[in-house]
Amino acid sequence: MSLIVVGTVAFDSIATPSGKADRVVGGAASYIALAASHFVKEQELISVIGEDFPNSFLSMLESRGVGQTGLKCIQGEKSFFWEGAYHDDLIGRDTLVTELNVLEGWEPEVPIKAREARFVMLGNLDPAVQLSVLNQLDKPPELVVLDTMNFWMDIALESLRKVIARVDVLMINDDEARQLSSESSLLLAAEAIHRMGPRTVVIKKGEHGAMLFEGGKCFYSPAYPLKKVIDPTGAGDTFAGGFIGYLTSVGETSWEAKKKAVVVGSVLASFTCEAFGTERIAGLKKLEWHQRTKDLSELIRVDYVLD
Ligand code: AMP
């Protein structure tokens, strides 16, 4: 098993200027695993759901190579639920409800076959769970990527800092980078985060793309430009899944590989924005994302300007 994915598997209710979706399947790990499944044939999902969760979604994940030995279903309890509403600019959003439900008090168990995973994606959820997963691994992975959000900074900063100190890559959005570092410049925020532990920092800027920082170097990719965004929920997680999925598939963690991973992450995230929920990323065809990857690569290519 080369990839472990941790994160929420959830129901989401979402309102955007394009409409509303009520209790659709979402969650950080759902988007991550689906995005990564475009690159890896096998991965292991570690998460928790309640008895209300649909089997059809789990079967679809299974058919895409997402192993579920580490997915616990708790009878008599409800799955994680999140409700959010986007502002007209589709950048700002308000979280209206976060119901932890099954997540509360849950202790993850990493299946034996996954304890030697080379790549680990600690998607957004309780940092205590992320830490527990790291502690159960038999040997240090080649790359551990951590994604989190302001919710956990607000209620669990101490355990979040502990897990941040243990990972190779921290991936967060621009507001969260500012909150975590107390710096308003993203360059200074990235430097402050490096000092917390991660050698590599990825700052996601929504429709303005993503920045990658490592060893004093910086790479920036714009987002794939879309004429219409229906629902950006899960775009950050899809980006994360594309990023780790690509690196797992090439088996590399070099700077150049990470730059390409940022580009493919941005491409996959653009598809998630085109519909509510996970349907678009689940049904995505290889031809579609290959074409967008070519287009985005072309968009950012330039010959040396002063030649
Ligand atoms: P994103 O739009 O990439 O930030 O991700 C949105 C997804 O994250 C939704 O599908 C939610 O179910 C999930 N989510 C929202 N809040 C949290 C939280 N506090 N912890 C973990 N996952 C969350």
Image (cartoon, grey):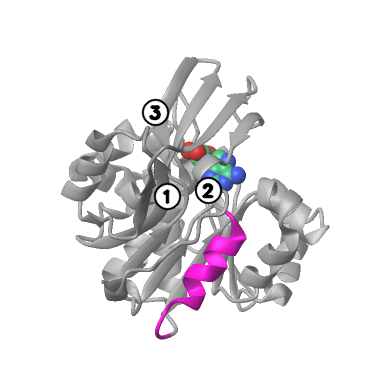
Does residue 292 sit above or below 127 in this rendering?
A: above
Which region of the structure is painted magenta?
126-139
Q: Are marks 2 and 3 in contact (CB under 8 Å)?
A: no
Q: Quadrant of the N terminus?
A: bottom left
- Please give the name of the residue rendered at 50% of the width and 61% of the height, measured from the top-left corner: 107
Mark 1: amino acid:
Val
- How far apart marks 1 and 3 lie (CA) works out to 27 Å
Q: Quadrant of residue 9?
A: top left
Point out which mark residue 274 bears: 3
In primary-sequence order, the first of circles 2 and 3 is 2
The residue closer to the viewer here, 91 or 218, is: 91
- Label 2 crowd (10 A; few <14 / some 14-19 / many >=20): many
- Label 3 crowd (10 A; few <14 / some 14-19 / many >=20): some
Q: Is residue 170 visible to the viewer in this orientation of the structure?
A: yes
The residue carrying mark 1 is: 48
- How far apart marks 2 and 3 lie (CA) works out to 29 Å
Mark 2: amino acid:
Leu
Q: Is residue 59 left or right of residue 106?
A: left
Q: Is residue 230 left or right of residue 64?
A: right
- How far apart marks 2 and 1 lie (CA) works out to 7 Å
Q: Is residue 79 left or right of residue 34?
A: right
Residue 171 screen position, x and y as percent: 57, 59
In primary-sequence order, the first of circles 2 and 1 is 1
- Please give the name of the residue rendered at 30% of the width and 33% of the height, measured from the top-left corner: 54
Judged by depth in the image, the label closer to the viewer, 1 or 3, is 1
> Which residue is situated farthest in the front direction here?
76
The residue closer to the viewer here, 236 or 118, is: 118
- Please give the name of the residue rendered at 32% of the width and 69% of the height, measured from the top-left corner: 111
> Which residue is situated farthest in the left direction here?
63
The residue carrying mark 2 is: 103
Q: Are marks 2 and 1 in contact (CB under 8 Å)?
A: yes
